[in-house]
Image (cartoon, coloured by chain):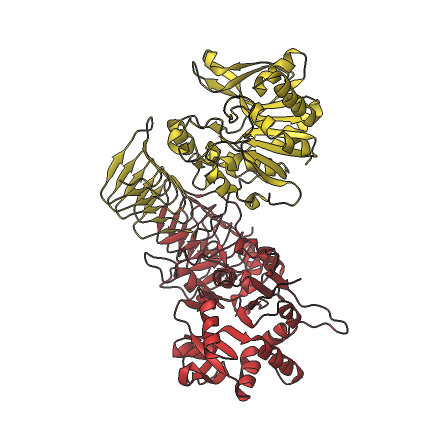
Chain colours: A red, B yellow
Amino acid sequence: MIKKKETVAMLLAGGQGSRLHLLTERTAKPAVTFGGKYRIIDFPLSNCINSGIDTVGVLTQYQPLALNEYIGNGQPWDLDRTYGGVTLLPPYQMNKRADWYKGTANAIYQNLQFIDKFDPDYVVILSGDHIYKMDYADMISAHKHSGADCTIAVFDVPLAEASRFGIMTLGENNRVVEFTEKPKQPKSTKASMGVYVFDRAKLAAYLEADEADEKSEKDFGKNVIPAMLNAGEKLFAYEFKGYWKDVGTINSLWEANMDLLGERPVLTLRDKNWRMFSRNDAMPPHYVGSGAVINNSIITEGCEIYGTVINSVLSAGVCVERGAVVRDSVIFGNVTVESDAEVDYSVIDADTVVGKGAKVGAEMALAKGITLVGGGLCLPDGVTVPDGAICGADMIKELSGGKNK
Amino acid sequence: MNAVGILFSGINENSVHELTKERTMASVPFGCRYRLIDFTLSNLVNAGITHVGLITHYNYQSLMDHIGSGKDWDLARRRGGFHLLPPFVTAFTGSGAAQLWSTWLEALVGVRDFIYECKEDLFVLSDCDSVCNLDLDSMIRSHVESGAEVTLAVKTAYLTDGTRNLTVVASAPDGRITDMIDSLGMPGGYADVSLKLLVTGKRFITEAINAAISRGYRDLIKYIQLRTSEGGDCRVFRFDGYFARVSDLTEYYRCSMDLLDPDIRRSLFAVRNRPVLTKVRNSAPSTYINGSVVRNSLIADGCVIEGTVENSIIFRGVKIGKNTHVKNCILMQDTFTGSNVYLNCVVTDKNAVIRDGRVLSGHETLPFFIGKNGSV
């Protein structure tokens, strides 16, 4: 027997995140490292458990191995439950046909059975690509209070960026009057955060209707929400006033990491009442050697620092050898920066070795852009990776070929 | 692995009385994020042992809190897994007041029902207050291959005159134990010291328990000695890696500072396939503020560092204030130091608060100690 749950959360984690280039070549975007010891998906998952939601379906599709392994039985988030807990929901084969998830709405549609099992009153739709701390329980209570059929979380974005989001026009009591996905000429700065609370019956009805519509792109923002508005359903906005960042690009991912730095960081992960949970390897404390210089940085377990680290975020197991300098950079797990190498204004993916005396990127003020180095690579000693470059295995070949190595 | 682990918490409870006033030796914090029991427990788990009983003594609340269901060691199992065995004191004592166990053998008698129920053939018995990363798997294999009744781990160490609380093990070249002597009566010099870790079979344990009940034996070491004198095959297993057991606060201080040595750190934490596991606390990474200076120190997660830290061991959630200088110190979980503080050779227990401008100094030979929740 399955106990009824008031709320079930569905977390869309199948996105490729192609604008993160090499970082998502072999991992889904929600599994990308963030803030030293977290993955992006830790944020919605921790938000769920902190909001009292203990039943979460995670919809995976693109490169799910790392993500599946990371979520596992949900134990780090206290989501290993006898009733509910976390369930991974990959696309599957049906009696007569098989389908990939064709869009956000279709992904949920294909898993209506999962939702029905728990007989919930509300369904929360989340996405796995934002960094934010949010109490969904407060949003659900606003949803109940307004008697809405759907409540959409909104965040005020700068007008210049508004055309990247679903933009809403709000009427009285924050009722949604108009919703346009990625408008060329945005009419307001109220952007959808991709966090929805639905009345379950309404959700099921509109998903079924959307599925039947062959012209539909099977997307919440493009199809389902406009269809509900057209039919005169009650849609309300829930204004969120905390930190929220879409980390879909290398620049925004880098910025969000930098937001953790400083005496009073814009985004803090030390809030004991809103703890962020993550799956960690058992690593020893980090060691700082005698000649090390560390300024305005974040360092975590398993690191060994003998060189200089300035304005940077280091993940677990990073080694910065003597004479090496890491500045304005985000370094993922188990990267080694060998002696006298210099890393400037860069993002380096996990398990890469930066050879002795190598130079990655250029000083932030002068650089053309952030330099991105892929994972599991070996940068030969003394090479230079130009600023703004995207350095994968091909580029390494080219670089070492030039040096006859 | 066809073996079950039996751990004894709290034989040497009073040796570091500053740290064990409110906890057992097994749950004494060590090395920024660990408790002493983590090392022994990880040794068992890394050898593939998935069934562990922990016999507790006094003050085991903090120990229970640390281990919980055992899931951080992968010991939350339906079959086997972690079992907490509280001290056995019957309400119906035949004579005199109920006695808490004080030796391994007494403790084993108290948990004999647990032992009889174990389906495994081999038993690993160990105290849980030592720091080492030992290849228990090869010790168990050598026990099985030699066919010995008991295999006891030893390490060659230099003893000064009249060292307390150690058992010196004499053995023949083939590894057979010939004698076991209390270190107190020994002259100084090199000797093989018992690591209080042994492998044995179910039969031996059962016989020892029976002998304890029927003949009143109280000490497993004495019982092993008796067996050796009767021709029983008891052997040593030599361990030559890093090993530390703390006997007082100065020793605790010295062993903690050992971790600043890269070789020692490597031999404890960087052994392939033998990680040291501990309870996950989900602290955020540590933050270094502009102006911080850190040299030769080990630092756990969750710290905020604004001042200077040198040659120190900093536990989780410690705050080092502006213009504060911390030198040769061990600051435990959530210690708070204000600004313009100077600390040298200070050991603080959990949640200590050192307010602005305080100057405190101990010495390596006698560190200055601030107790749990203490404030200066």
Nearer-the-camera pick, A83 or B362 = A83
Quarter containing the N terminus of chain B? top right
Q: Is residue B79 left or right of residue A316?
A: right
Horizontal and vertical percent position of residue A389: 48, 63
Find residue A368 and report its image quarter.
Answer: bottom left
Find residue A71 and report its image quarter.
Answer: bottom right
Q: Residue furthest left?
A: B357
Horizontal and vertical percent position of residue B184: 46, 14
For image coordinates 65% across by 40% down, the residue present is B80
For image coordinates 48% across by 45% down, the residue present is A302
Viewer can see residue B173? no
Horizontal and vertical percent position of residue B309: 33, 42
- How many numbered circles are shown? 0
- Looking at the image, is A20 positioned above or below residue A377? below
- Looking at the image, is A51 positioned above or below residue B297? below
Q: Residue furthest right?
A: A96
Q: Is residue B30 left or right of residue B54?
A: left
- Looking at the image, is A83 positioned above or below residue A10? above
Horizontal and vertical percent position of residue A329: 42, 57
For image coordinates 58% across by 77% down, the residue present is A203
Viewer can see residue A267? yes
Quarter containing the C terminus of chain B? top left
Nearer-the-camera pick, B122 or A259 = B122
